[in-house]
Amino acid sequence: MSRWKIALIVVVVLLAALIGWRMFSHATPGAASAGGQQRGGGSGADSDPIPVTVVAATTQDVPVYKSALGTVQALSTVTVNAQVSGQLKALHFAEGQEIKQGDLIAEIDPRTFQAALDQAAAKKKQDAAQLVASQSTLARYEELMKKNFVSAQDLENQRQTVRQQQALVAADDAAVSSAQTQLGYTRIVAPINGVAGIRGVDVGNLVTANGTGIVTLTQIHPINVMFPLPEKDLESVRGAQAKTPDAVEVIALDRTDAHEIAHGVLKVVDNQIDTSTGTFKVKSEFANADGSLWPGQFVNVRVKVRTDAGAIVVPATAVQRGPDNSYAYVLQPDNTVAMKPVVPGGDAGSDNVVVTSGLAAGDRVVTEGQFRLKPGSKVHALAPGEAPAAPTAEELAKLKAKAGAQGQRGGGGPRH
């Protein structure tokens, strides 16, 4: 190694040693203690109170809900088919239209069926005329039989003829009724109240009995919502249904849980649990007068199973989650805070939660500013929305003097 490189290394080492010695010589024992107090989180006796927002725990009657993801289903769904074959003559609905039960939907060309009815009616008249003639002959035979002008065998034969023709007339009545029914099927009417879907055939096409559906009707007033719940909720749901049959409240919300769409009631709890998923199905019914629910729609569902009277309620921000359990900071009479373990329950609406254990009504809990706290910290309690008062001139002077004293203790001598 060349001499100038060795000299450079020696100079660097000497400079580093000199800088280290100067820093060590100007350090004072009070500096470490002052820094320790600053890092102590403001828990010293002369530290300033930490401003925090405090809210008192209250008691409320809180409804308890079970939540699930549900699917909207039409109360009834009917595919309207032709019951006789023929040419589609007319359609009497618009796609998407609400149709009442009994409204005319479509017509099939009726001429062939009208001809069959006319033929059956004519055959009945023919057989009825023959029956009248045979009955008249039977009456004459019965008069002549009294004078022994007709044999008993002829009389009995005539009676048999009358019976046969009576049977023919009865068969003609059935044929006429059948022809009338077939003719009636050429006028297709709505079997239920519902909304018409997209038509399956157009006017002029030949339709066959039970072939392609003409249109599908879905009944949406009222409407059902089906949803699964875990089997652990079975007892609570059935218990609520047993207490108030047909009155267990069900709420449908949008997919973000932000808005209530409709209110309904629980109708049916399925009679078995699905062993593959560990859930059971529940059917609820909604009046849906405004059509806010639509078949096939996904909604969030909440079922009210009970109401907890006098539950302890605090803002959700008051409950903090630690490594072992949940906790809340509670304001003490001496304006310090204590950390208390709590057991949170369900939501209580309006960004509040139920606390089932750890708090009592009236306990003042910290809802904002917890990140600066530790057990025993001195605090300045503020109401929600309240800001700390601006420091006075005297307080500002004290703070400035205190900051200067701390700087002198920890800043060291002049630098060169």
Image (cartoon, rainbow, N blue to C red):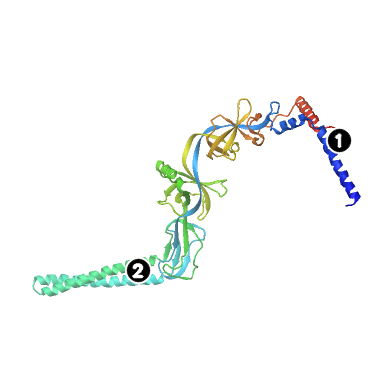
Please, is residue 310 above or below residue 132 in the view? above
Please, is residue 346 above or below residue 210 in the view? above
Q: Which residue is mark 1?
A: 415
Q: Position of residue 184 (x, y in %)?
A: 39, 65
Task: Examine the image and state in which quarter residue 133 appears.
Answer: bottom left
Residue 193 seen in the figure: yes
Q: Position of residue 68 (x, y in %)?
A: 50, 48
Task: Examine the image and state in which quarter residue 338 appears.
Answer: top right
Farthest residue to the right: give it.
4
Farthest residue to the left: give it.
148
Residue placed most toward the observer, 30 or 375: 30
Structural distance between the alpha carbons of marks 2 and 1: 118 Å
Q: Is residue 187 left or right of residue 387?
A: left
**Label 2 vs 1, first from the N-terminus:** 2
Q: Position of residue 237 (x, y in %)?
A: 44, 44
Task: Give the number of the disc on residue 179.
Answer: 2
Which residue type does callout 1 highlight?
A: Arg
Q: Position of residue 390 (x, y in %)?
A: 73, 29
Q: Are marks 2 and 1 in contact (CB under 8 Å)?
A: no
Q: Is residue 72 left or right of residue 35?
A: left
Q: Which quadrant is the C terminus positioned in?
A: top right
Q: Residue at x 59, y 40 (%)?
A: 323
Task: Give the number of the disc on residue 335.
Answer: none
Q: Residue at x 42, y 49 (%)?
A: 268
